[in-house]
Amino acid sequence: MGAIYETYIYGFQQHNINGHRLLNFVDDDALKEFGVTSSHNRRVIIFSIRQLKNKHAPSMISNNAPVRDFYSEYLGDFVPRLRLTDSTYPHTMSCVLKPLQDKAHLVLYDQIINWLEPLPFGIDIDKIELVHNPQIYRMFLQQMNRTERQQTQDAFQPHLDMESNPTERRNVLDRLQTLIQQVNHNRKASVVRLWHGCKRDIVSQLVSDGFAALSKLDNGWFGKAMYFTSSAEYAAKYTDPTGCLIMCYVVLLNPFPVITDDAPPLVSSKTFRFYGTGNYANYQCHYIPVAPVNEDTWWNFRPPPNGVQDATFDEFAIFQQSDILPQVIVHLKPGTTSSASGTSNENFQRIFLSKE
């Protein structure tokens, strides 16, 4: 058809157009939504679709099996809601929300603000950006499908009675259940909405290629993994006032509940049970409710000794990239009276990014 039509590929990917949808649902109006502004180019594409449909009509008729539309089986908060037209990041479509100019943007902006809750003093929002990487999105949906099969298999059932303090560990999982219930969708797998704080200069890598490289940065207190939290306020501790918070959806199979027995308050973090290790046994990830030790709200957070009811934040140690779907980037900026203004970038990175 010509190189000029390659510029429309992202529009088709953004709307999850597979072979079945191409042949049955793409018309002139749909092409306009995909960004094909030229009426001539739309006519050429429609003609090519008709030729393709006629070419495969006999095989389509002879196949009596129902056609399975992969993407239509997944409904929920994690499904992209707006058409994204920018290509700020490689392999990824994006869109900066403009709540004062677009009502649809305003609705989503307000919802994200509600998910954010209060940010630390001295940090404000610069802008909020939606992102959609078609490859990561499909991988996430496939992982969700795989998780639904595995969660009924004996090999992935928890065995908390074999661990210390199984009652407290079940209390931790009860806390996790409240987070699972906050994400609306139609699938059997459990999904949570989490945050990751990072410096602005690595955002492109994370949304384009995934979070897997993060597990190589340091050993990790609760496992050598990719770390997330349900609290944007807590995630902000791992960036700086000009950094970013990335909101992700994460699919869960069988999280292992980490308690104070695994990470006591008065020992070196290097003696923690899961320090620098991979995922424990057949557990897909580790879930750790945490609280500050000795009122040190700067960086020393561990499982509370008296039980999960004292936890102020939480951490998730995720070991597989396919479990993670980045969807929102909140770009930060210093507030008018930044609480971090007296902290050098070097010290800020040393304290927040190195949990050794």
Image (tube, grey):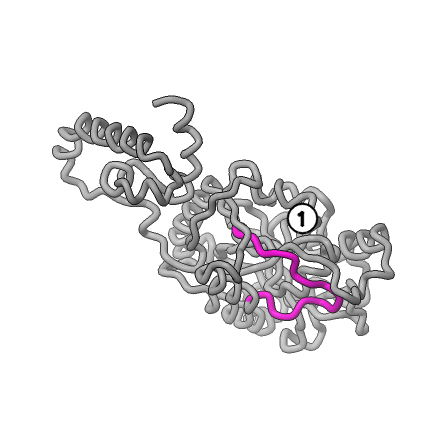
Give the residues in magenta. Answer: 115-130
- Circle 1: is it few (<14), some (14-19), or many (20+) Cα within 10 Å? many
Residue type at tag 1: Lys
Q: Position of residue 199 (x, y in %)?
A: 71, 49
Nearest to the observer: residue 261 or residue 336? 336
| 202 is higher (above) or lower (below) than 239 | above
The answer to which image quadrant residue 148 occupies is bottom left
Nearest to the observer: residue 165 or residue 176? 176
Q: Which residue is at a point 31% across and 35% down the rendered structure image?
A: 39
Is residue 356 visible in this depiction of the protein? yes
Q: Where is residue 127 in the image (x, y as percent from the top left)?
A: 61, 56
Nearest to the observer: residue 164 or residue 264? 264
Is residue 158 visible in this depiction of the protein? no
**Image mark count:** 1
Task: Report the residue that reaches farthest toward the top.
Answer: 2
Q: Which residue is at a point 85% across and 58% down the rendered structure image?
A: 343
Whether residue 226 sits left or right of residue 53 in the image: it is: right
Q: Does the magenta stretch include residue 127?
A: yes
Q: Where is the N terminus found, in terms of image quarters?
A: top left
Q: Which residue is at a point 66% across and 53% down the rendered structure image?
A: 244
Q: Is mark 1 on a helix, strand or loop?
A: loop
| 218 is higher (above) or lower (below) than 91 | below
Q: Which residue is at a point 70% across and 72% down the rendered structure image?
A: 304
Q: Position of residue 186 (x, y in %)?
A: 36, 60
Q: Position of residue 58 (x, y in %)?
A: 13, 29
Provide the residue designation for mark 1: 224
Q: Does the magenta stretch include residue 289?
A: no
